[in-house]
Image (tube, rainbow, N blue to C red):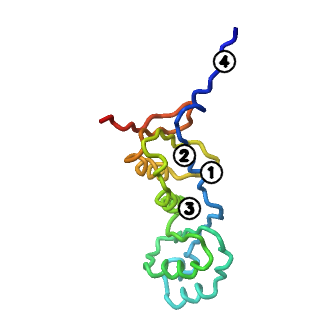
Amino acid sequence: MEKEIINRVANSKLITIDLEAYYPAGNRIQIDIAPWLLEGIVLKENDFRNHVSEHNWSQYKDCFVALYCSTDAIIPGWAYMLLSIALAPYAKKVTVGSLDMLETAIFSEIVGDLSVEEYKDKPVIIKGCSHKAIPPAAYTLLAQKLQPIAKSIMYGEACSSVPLFKKKRP
């Protein structure tokens, strides 16, 4: 007589959150402003403003954009602000820094907007494997957001999760 195999994972109350499901579509692009500087290091306001006004910003439609300078130039804050204003009608999001910083900013917003009430007093697994690059900070932010409400938080897959937090019983 064969014993029936029961899938305890499928029958459990575990809820899996996959951050990859929230990954927004759109190209991630870096814009280096060094070519717009005199000898790559000096920002001359009139020349810089001319570059900004003549640049085709529409090419960044529906993109996520990271602004940076590849040289050791000292860039005044208003320069990045001016660029972000020029990009505003086209880009989905604009940050200053690397593509990693851009991705972290994108996911900080996503996790911040995520409703977590459905996870109240429930065991939650934050799925760890993904095909898209999810920044490590996104997992940290999600764990912090879930901790006050979830019964428990684990990381990984239901069949091989790493326990991170368990609410103490009163």
Farthest left residue in view: 170
- Residue 159 falls in image quadrant: top right
x 70%, y 8%: residue: 1
- Residue 90 x, y percent position in the rendering: 62, 77
Viewed as shown, does residue 29 lie left or right of 107? right
- Residue 2 x, y percent position in the rendering: 69, 11
Mark sitting earlier along the chain (1/4): 4
Mark 2 or 1, closer to the camera = 2
> For residue 99, which numbered disc appears in the image?
3
- State whether residue 123 is above or below residue 24: above
- Residue density around tag 4, few if under 14, some if 14–19, many if 20 or more, within 10 Å: few
Amino acid residing under circle 4: Glu
Mark 3 or 2, closer to the camera = 2
Q: Which residue is mark 4?
A: 4
> For residue 132, which numbered disc appears in the image?
1
Disc 2 + disc 1, Cβ < 8 Å: no
Farthest top residue in view: 1
